[in-house]
Image: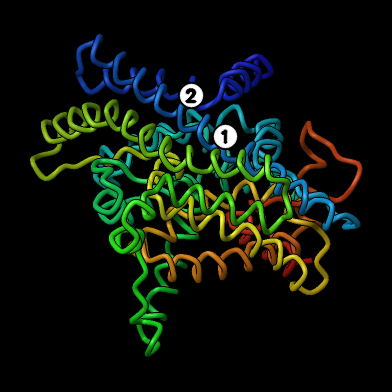
Amino acid sequence: MLDACLAFFQGFINLGAAVMLPVVIAILGIFFRMKIGQAIKSGLLVGIGFQGLCLAVNLLTTTIQPVMDYYEEIGSGYDVLEIGFAALGGAAWTVPFAVFAIPAIVIINLILVRTKLTKVLNVDIWNYMHFLVPGALAYALFGSAIIGFLVTLVCAVVALFFAQWEAPEWGEFYGLDGTTCTTLSFCAWVYPISKLINKIIDKIPGLNKVDLSMDKIGSKLGVLGDPAVIGLFVGAFLSLLTRQSFGTLCTISMGVAAVMVLIPRMVSIMMEGLSPLGNKANEYMQSKLGDDAEIYIGMDIALGLGDPCCITCTAIMIPVTVLMAFIIPDMRFFPLGILAEVCYLAPMCVLTSKGNVFRTLVTMAIIMFGTLFFANMFAGEATQMMSVTGVSFDSMVTASHFGWNPGNLIVSLIHKLIA
């Protein structure tokens, strides 16, 4: 029975967020008393928008693949393999308590909303992996499924409160009213750290006066400041930096330009589906809990990728990230997979810097340095976690989650101190 349940949930998760989100949104819409047709339409629009968003992000990854191939040749010789978040998340779902994670997290979230302890309803089931990976790590390091399960639940609850903290700023800056980001690594790690860095910059004479936003760039450059044109130049910059052929340069430049235009459009389609749900959710909560009740729909960090500053700073940070691999002492892995994940670091850094390109790059550089440093330090713990899952590798491994997931960082640090 347990194996059958685990197989069901694994199969459901493997369908991906583009399939899960329409189902979850439609069910929530019906629960919050939307008409069945409206609930289904909202679910479809969210799913279509997210599918388009995934395609746009994949286009970005595919477009810059020649750039990553160039850096891969430079980075040969490292003895630790850096795996992507997809492999890590898939592995985490194979631990014994994974089958109980989704219903337990959903029930706890509903109880916390019902008791007014949080205003966040996390529908981002795909990113429950951000909670499950620290749980799987605790299970591997301490040999207890109970500890692993409790760590998973604690991470899920912590994300709700950080998501509520950031929600007003997130909604106002990105124009995503009624939503917030519940992706643990970014709401509970990148957001507070980037806010702290910006407060420090505010205290530094000279630096606190630097104000370089995409809007100001656009107003000064005219058509050259258009997001599509900026994407063209950014792609050309990456191509020249990695000595690409003229044909590849044109392909990369056009791909990045397309991403700059497509991502905001896809986010707007998602919001077309999310807005009616958010309105109905707030009406429902106010009828049950009073007029002051409010709900934020918790979503993936990718929802914040629509700002042109995100993609621009992502492209600039790719070579900077590579450079860091040669600066960090005793570095044992080359950050190839992380290069494809740099874009997810950008939204919170852009948010806290209010779109200031200079501050965003400073913040991203500091956080990325810490990410690589910790992912390198905790490679042993990462390898031990993978050893208790259904995914195995012949060498030592690590991943971005061991550098920017606060649950992993705390569990790994405790293990090192105890050991």
Name the quadrant containing residue 265: top left
Residue position marked by numbered label 2 in the rendering:
18
**Residue 20 in the image: x percent, y percent?**
47, 22
Residue 43 in the image: state x and y as whole percent. 35, 20
Q: Amino acid at mark 1?
A: Leu
**Element marked by disc 1:** helix
| Residue at point 91%, 42% (across, down) | 394
Scheme of colours in the image: rainbow
Task: Identify the residue at image location x=49%, y=60%.
Answer: 190
Q: Where residue 172 is drawn, which disc sits there?
A: none
Q: Is residue 161 visible?
A: no
Residue 388 horizontal/vertical position (percent): 79, 39
* CB under 8 Å between discs 2 and 1: no
Residue hosting label 1:
59
In the picture, which quadrant includes the C terminus? bottom right
Q: Residue at x 62, y 67 (%)?
A: 370
Query: For the image shown, how many numbered marks are present on the structure?
Result: 2
Identified by mark 2, the residue type is: Ala
Compared with 203, 383 (above or below) is: above
Q: Is residue 280 left or right of residue 315?
A: left
